[in-house]
Image (cartoon, grey):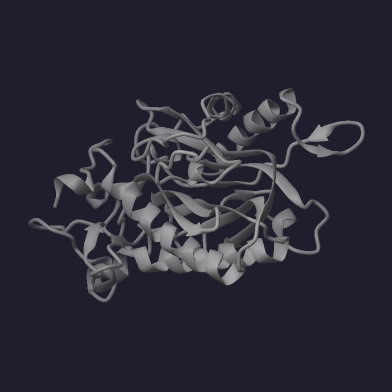
Amino acid sequence: MTKERHNAITDVPGIRVGHAQDAEALTGCTVILCERGAVGGVDQRGGAPGTRETDLLRPMHLVQQIHAVLLTGGSAFGLSAADGVVRWLEEHGYGFDARVARVPIVPAAVLFDLDIGRADVRPTSAMGYAACQSATDGPVAEGCQGAGTGARVGSVYGPGRAVKGGVGTASADLGGGVVVGALFAVNCFGDVVDPANGQIVAGARKLRGEGFADTLQSLRGFVGRQILRFAGRKNTVIGVVATNAALSKEEANKVAQMAQDGLARAIRPAHTMFDGDTIFALSTGRRRADVNLVGAYAAEVTAQAILRGVLTATPAGGLPAARDLR
């Protein structure tokens, strides 16, 4: 029986997604479960990351499989939500067999959402656990959900002139039963652009009048250069690409690296010192596919997921949504 497709990362066999959020405080987390084990990789290119358990994803390290990835708001405080994911996995018997216990391996990455909603409410262990409880392999809620609850886009003129960000997902069928999917929480310093035409679809709004300021152009002006001194250090884009193609750890890291090209196509500028820009890659299956093909389409679904993250967002925290500005 053919699995129904949802244009989501859950189209990849072995992947389930769950969200948990506080809609009043405007923060939350998203778990990508691969509880039966997945080969993992990571590529981190922004200058301001907040992460957990990323070193073990690199070649020459012992652990070969992970059991979940957590994407969370709350800045560094939000990393505590991973404890809830670990607890859920242990209770259900999943983890690295260390003889005396099964130790769940849960890499995580955070985004900064403390300046929207409430700064004193962050994702907790209980929220991470709740995200696991809600996880399914069906359609994935997008927009202001999970890690995207407090996300925003375009902060060159400060958070008050930004646009609401969110979570987005997409997938591609490569044929032969091979699927590649992506899920991203979009909280970038720069603007989100449509790779098809280069037009800004979400980003910093002009200080006067209507329309987008164009962050790249703004940085060249006097105001933009002055604002860079204090306004930018609160952003990141974090996400996961997954496939059921069989990948080694080296190949998974290559796919994560190639997926960054999709981020750069959809965000302008990307990989700044103000962004975390961390991408995890997961391989859940044994289908045969060339790593170059998988990586190329990982970049494609990354760009699509980022676009969907802003186009499905709704107004919150005093920020308008992109779909209301078009």
Query: Residue shown at 23%/74% (left/top)?
Result: 221
Q: Is residue 276 visible?
A: no
Q: Is residue 260 visible?
A: yes
Q: Position of residue 326 (x, y in %)?
A: 14, 52
- Left or right for 195, reference 27: left
Query: Residue shown at 27%/48% (left/top)?
Result: 311
- Image height check: is 118 above or below 319? above
Most extreme residue toward the bottom, as rendered? 220
Q: Position of residue 304 (x, y in %)?
A: 37, 56
- Left or right for 52, reference 90: left
Query: Residue shown at 23%/51% (left/top)?
Result: 161
- Which is nearer the eye, 227 or 70? 70
Most extreme residue toward the front, as rendered? 1
Kindly indicate the quadrant of the structure image that contains residue 265: bottom left
Q: Position of residue 194 (x, y in %)?
A: 27, 63
- Image height check: is 114 above or below 39? above
Most extreme residue toward the right, as rendered? 99
- Which is nearer the eye, 205 or 246? 246
Kindly indicate the quadrant of the structure image that contains residue 324: top left
Query: Residue shown at 31%/56% (left/top)?
Result: 155
Q: Position of residue 289 (x, y in %)?
A: 61, 64
Number of dots carrying numbers? 0
- Which is nearer the eye, 127 or 311? 311
